[in-house]
Every structure is written in structure tokens, then in C-alpha cells.
């Protein structure tokens, strides 16, 4: 049985910054509720079983989600975590709640990217890399989680995913600082996982595992490149949204097994960023139960020497990237994983 860890988004509660940037009372549920269909065959996925939950007001939701995930072959969650430098955090309350929870298997992913209002080209929150002292503070902030029994570990090392390692100018300092601090605190190390990383990346030696999810938003042919450039970068939305073919991208992505122990697959649970970006978004057509089943089966068999698989994602509702039960697939995506991950 593979160790499937699903990305978990903390966006579903109100914070002062989002109220300032997007309007009073904003959570990403607002985007889901107001989303429109732009493409024939497109259906906006909305929650059913778990509803429009609030991750701060309803602390029981974490156990409900984990129970549903665990009985369907998901080992745990990887919580999107924001550390912008100098102690600046955002959407940190779900992680604080999980600090008290002894039931839910979880780890963290450092979402090391700046925040923008992309429609207006405005920087909202800058990701900064402030060096060793700041990396020490970041580690100490997370240390109580690393020591918990229900924090996910591989080879007794706490799992930490980094969204985009190539953006860290002193990556060696960051990695070595954390490994040294782990040893000082009687941990076996850190099991570092790199996203947006391929076998050609120069820094793979720093990581225990890596995967490359760039394929999600990358054009496959000349026509897709032209439309992608016109809509997303030239902002000529009359030609949008950008439409890619899930079946074309993922039916054969992990068909051939890898010999690289570090090279792990990921499972994509749909993709529709029109919910967030409207006609500047990307929609993957032909995401259906058959194509998802082929994709999951290939991912499970891809690396016989590494049990880790990242599921992208459990609850990224504003990008149509969901494993929770919804009005289109109900719990059938979960059932596919349960049936294949044995």
C-alpha cells in the first residue's frame, strides 16, 4: 500500500488581509459559489458531504475529513503553510488547531511564493528569504509539530515539502540549517520533498524525493502555446479560458516505471482555475472517472522503490482540484483510490 499524502489548503476561514484585498467576509467559498461555466462540458464542482465548512469555527471538520480520507486509502494531509520571512505568516490558524489534534496524520508544505492580485498585477505579500537566522526561527516555529506522534514521518524523519526550491537563493543554507537543527533536537533528520523539480534540476541532491507538477499549466502543442500566451500573458480574455486535455496529459504520464528512487509521482484530482481567474484560467477537459482511474493506477505503479505519492489536492476548491465529495463525482474519486491502493 502506497503512502498517499494529499495537499490540504487552509483558505477556508476569514482573515483580515483577505477582507482588505477582496472584500469583507471573503473566503474562497465565495469564488466557488459565484463561479461560471465558460466551456462546453465544464461543470463547477461544489461541496456536498462536508459542506461549506469553516476551518476555524468548526474544529471537528479536521477529524471528519481525515476519517473520510483514511478509509479511502489516503494516509494523511500536507498542509499548505506560509512563512514570508521575519515571522510573517498568513492563514496559520488551521496549523495552530492541528497542533492540538492527536488524531489527524499531517505534515506541512512550505508554500514559498509571493501573493499577487494577478488581474491587476499588484503584489500583495512578498516572499522573502532572509538567511540563516530567519530559517532558524521558521524551524523553531514548526518544531512542536515535528515532535508529535501524528506528524507524518518517513524513516523517522518529519516530512516537509517545498513548493518551489529553485526560488530559494541560499537553498543550501536553508537545508543544512534545518538538518543541523533537527539533529540538535533529537530528530533523525528532515525528509525533504521538492515540488516543481525534475531530474535535470541541479539541487535534487538536497532532497529525499521530488516531483514536477509543471505539466498542469504547460502547453503541449503550438496551438495551446499560442492561446495560453494570448489569454494568460497578453490578457486578451476574449479567447479564454485556456483549455487543456487531462486525458492527453495524464493517461501516460507515469506509465513507464522510474529507476530513480527519489522521483515520485503525483495524483491530480482535476483542474479548473476559471473559478479563481475566470476567463484567464485553465480548464482541463476530459477529466472523468476512467481517465482518473488510469492516472491513479499509473501513479501507484510508477516507483516500486518509494511508497510516497503526493495527491494534488484534497480541497483546492477555487482551482477545481478536489478529492472531497462534490456534486459532480460524489465520493467516486475516493473510491477509485481505495480500490487501487491496496
Image: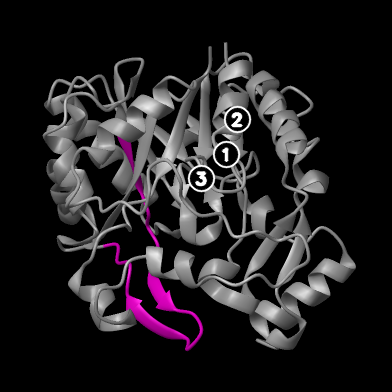
Report whether residue 207 is seen.
Answer: no
- For residue 55, side relative to residue 143 (left or right): right
Q: Nearer the viewer, residue 64 or 14?
A: 64
How many C-alpha atoms fall within 10 Å of the one at disc 3: few (<14), some, or many (≥20)? many
Q: Nearer the viewer, residue 129 or 140?
A: 140
What is the span of residues highlighted in magenta in the rendered image?
107-129
Crowd rating for badge 2 (residues with CA inside 10 Å; few <14, some 14–19, many 20+): many
Query: Which mark is on residue 211?
Result: 1
- Expressed as whole percent of the image width and height from the top left, the position of residue 161 reads 40, 40
Relative to 206, is 150 above or below?
Answer: above
Cβ atoms under marks 3 and 2 closer than 8 Å: no
Give the residue at mark 3.
Answer: 195
Question: Could you tell me which residue is drawn at 88 percent across and 70 percent down?
Answer: 223
Residue placed under numbered mark 2 in the picture:
263
Q: Which image quarter is the C terminus in?
A: top right
Which residue lies at the image location 76% right of the left edge and 65% below the top edge?
243
Label whose residue precedes the other's in the sequence (1 or 2): 1
Q: Residue at x 63, y 18 (%)?
A: 340
Q: In the rendered image, which quarter is residue 335 located in?
A: top right
Amino acid at each position: 500500500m502506497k503512502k498517499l499524502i494529499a495537499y490540504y489548503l487552509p483558505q477556508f476561514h476569514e482573515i483580515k488581509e483577505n477582507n482588505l484585498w477582496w472584500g469583507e467576509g471573503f473566503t474562497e467559498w465565495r469564488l466557488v459559489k459565484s463561479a461560471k461555466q465558460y466551456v462546453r462540458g465544464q461543470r463547477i464542482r461544489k461541496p456536498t458531504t462536508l459542506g461549506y465548512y469553516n476551518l476555524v469555527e468548526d474544529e471537528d471538520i479536521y477529524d471528519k475529513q481525515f476519517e473520510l480520507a483514511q478509509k479511502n486509502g489516503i494516509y494523511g494531509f500536507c498542509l499548505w503553510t506560509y512563512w514570508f520571512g521575519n515571522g510573517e505568516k498568513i492563514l496559520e490558524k488551521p496549523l495552530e488547531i492541528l497542533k492540538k489534534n492527536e488524531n489527524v496524520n499531517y505534515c506541512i508544505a512550505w508554500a514559498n511564493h509571493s501573493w499577487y492580485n494577478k488581474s491587476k498585477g499588484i503584489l500583495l505579500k512578498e516572499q522573502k528569504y532572509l538567511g540563516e537566522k530567519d530559517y532558524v526561527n521558521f524551524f523553531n516555529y514548526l518544531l512542536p509539530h515535528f515532535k508529535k506522534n501524528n506528524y507524518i514521518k518517513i524513516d523517522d524523519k518529519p516530512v516537509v515539502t517545498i513548493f518551489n526550491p529553485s526560488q530559494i537563493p541560499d537553498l543550501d543554507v536553508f537545508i543544512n540549517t534545518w538538518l543541523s537543527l533537527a539533529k540538535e533536537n533529537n530528530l533523525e533528520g528532515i525528509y525533504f520533498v521538492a515540488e516543481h523539480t525534475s531530474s535535470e534540476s541541479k539541487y535534487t541532491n538536497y532532497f529525499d524525493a521530488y516531483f514536477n507538477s509543471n505539466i498542469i499549466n504547460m502547453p503541449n502543442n503550438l496551438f495551446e502555446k499560442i492561446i495560453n500566451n494570448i489569454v494568460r500573458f497578453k490578457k486578451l480574455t476574449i479567447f479564454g479560458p485556456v483549455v487543456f486535455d487531462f486525458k492527453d496529459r495524464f493517461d501516460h504520464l507515469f506509465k513507464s516505471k522510474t529507476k530513480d528512487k527519489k522521483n515520485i509521482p503525483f495524483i491530480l484530482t482535476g483542474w479548473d482555475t476559471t473559478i479563481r481567474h475566470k476567463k484567464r484560467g485553465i480548464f482541463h477537459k476530459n477529466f472523468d472517472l476512467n481517465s482518473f482511474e488510469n492516472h491513479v493506477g499509473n501513479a501507484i505503479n510508477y516507483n516500486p522503490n518509494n511508497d510516497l505519492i503526493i495527491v494534488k489536492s484534497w480541497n483546492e476548491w477555487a482551482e477545481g482540484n478536489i478529492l472531497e465529495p462534490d456534486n459532480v463525482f460524489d465520493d467516486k474519486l475516493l473510491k477509485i483510490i481505495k480500490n487501487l491502493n491496496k
